[in-house]
Image (cartoon, helix red, strand yellow):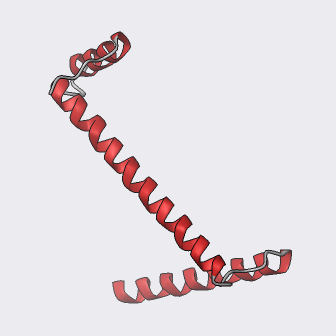
Amino acid sequence: MKVHFTPDQEAFVRQAIQSGRLHGEEEAVQEALALWEERERTRACILAAVDAAKASLAQGKGRVITQQSMQELAEEVKQRGRARLAAEQSAAR
């Protein structure tokens, strides 16, 4: 497979090679593809979460957002966090 860089990309890759950051053009492409794959995996997870949320709402599940419900949610999250921290600290002993 042949890859063609723009002049700016070539300069960028060349500078990374000269500085020792990368060992060659192939490594630059591999790193770029790894970042792209990671971004696409993250995107897929986000889209799956959105689909799950939409399905949940369609089933009538969800929360009415009010000042009170947000305070209650924040308290629930804090309590779960404290419980998890306590469990981790107990396991570390």
Q: Position of residue 33 (x, y in %)?
A: 28, 39
Dividing the image into 4 quarters, which one contains the N terminus? top left
Q: Position of residue 62 (x, y in %)?
A: 68, 80
Q: Name the residue located 51 percent from the left edge and 67 percent from the top edge.
A: 49
Horizontal arrangement in the rendering, residue 90 relative to residue 32 (left or right): right
Q: Position of residue 71 (x, y in %)?
A: 78, 78
Q: Is residue 4 above or below residue 46?
A: above
Q: Position of residue 52 (x, y in %)?
A: 53, 73
Q: Name the residue located 35 percent from the left edge and 42 percent from the top edge.
A: 36
Query: Given the current orientation, which residue lies at the most extreme top position?
Result: 7
| Residue sitting nearer the eye, 34 or 20 | 34
Say which quarter of the image contains residue 14: top left
Q: Is residue 61 above or below residue 47?
A: below
Q: Name the residue located 30 percent from the left edge and 35 percent from the top edge.
A: 32
Q: Is residue 49 above or below residue 73?
A: above
| Residue sitting nearer the eye, 19 or 76 | 76
Query: Given the current orientation, which residue lies at the most extreme right position?
Result: 67
Horizontal arrangement in the rendering, residue 54 relative to residue 70 (left or right): left
| Residue sitting nearer the eye, 89 or 84 | 84
| Residue sitting nearer the eye, 46 or 78 | 46
Total marks shown come to 0
Say which quarter of the image contains residue 23: top left
- Residue 50 appears in the rendering: yes
- Residue 93 appears in the rendering: no
Dividing the image into 4 quarters, which one contains the C terminus? bottom left
